Image (cartoon, grey):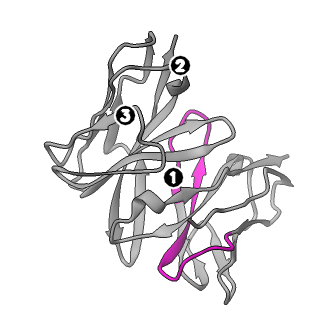
Amino acid sequence: LAKTTQPISMDSYEGQEVNITCSHNNIATNDYITWYQQFPSQGPRFIIQGYKTKVTNEVASLFIPADRKSSTLSLPRVSLSDTAVYYCLVGVLFSGGYNKLIFGAGTRLAVHP
Amino acid sequence: DAGITQSPRYKITETGRQVTLMCHQTWSHSYMFWYRQDLGHGLRLIYYSAAADITDKGEVPDGYVVSRSKTENFPLTLESATRSQTSVYFCASSVEREGQETQYFGPGTRLLVL
């Protein structure tokens, strides 16, 4: 199983760029990397997903090095509303195999004024 | 997100009782999931379903039973609740779109087993 390791917590200030790194040394060839955001008392919400190199959408970027043993979620110019827990998820998609899908313990991001 | 609902939102029960948590999606997503979330453990997959009448175990299936007679419903049953099953339970469904697979989570059910 591709176990993931993330920092437990991070602090930032409004307007700064935040980078959260997830380590997944045992990632398999068919595994994808997905990041979710979770606010208190809510279910997680999809942020971004990728397989290799760089992926960017309207809210974040995901950087994946060639060896794919880690990935970095980048949040540009964070605001107070980005205070949440961020989860890194590694696993096979599109074809089942979800019993091998592992969520990390999450990184608690606190954004300060 | 409004397309997936869970009921009840809060539940208190006693050890040994049977409890069923309901999950309903208004989309026609094939895949549905049940997770539990405990402090320090993030989310752990209990069961998932690829389609009606097709279910499979996740990481922590013991003590739980699922069924899926209709695509839109995926109930989770604790046949004999234990205190260790006190947790927040999230249901999710997933869809593949433009080469990405996204899971949509419900609001969660907070279960307390006394």
Residue B74 location, quadrant: top left
What chain letter is assigned to the residue under label 3? B
Residue A109 is left or right of residue A103, and the answer is right
Which amino acid type corresponds to the residue marked 1 in the rendered image? Answer: Arg
- Say few, some or many: other residues with alpha carbon within 10 Å of mark 1 (under 14 / 14 to 19 / 20 or more): some
Which amino acid type corresponds to the residue marked 2 in the rendered image? Answer: Arg
Disc 3 and disc 1 on one polypeptide chain: no
Residue tagged 3: B64
For the point 67% across and 70% down, the residue is A24
Task: Nearest to the eye among marks 3 and 1: give it.
Answer: 3
Residue tagged 2: B83
For the point 49% across and 60% down, the residue is A101
Query: Regarding mark 3 in the picture, which secondary structure is present there?
Result: strand
For the point 64% across and 43% down, the residue is B41
Q: Quadrant of the N terminus of chain A?
A: bottom right
Residue tagged 1: A45
- Say few, some or many: other residues with alpha carbon within 10 Å of mark 3 (under 14 / 14 to 19 / 20 or more): some
Along the line of sight, the residue nearer the viewer: A92 or B65: B65
Q: Is residue B58 above or below residue A18?
A: above
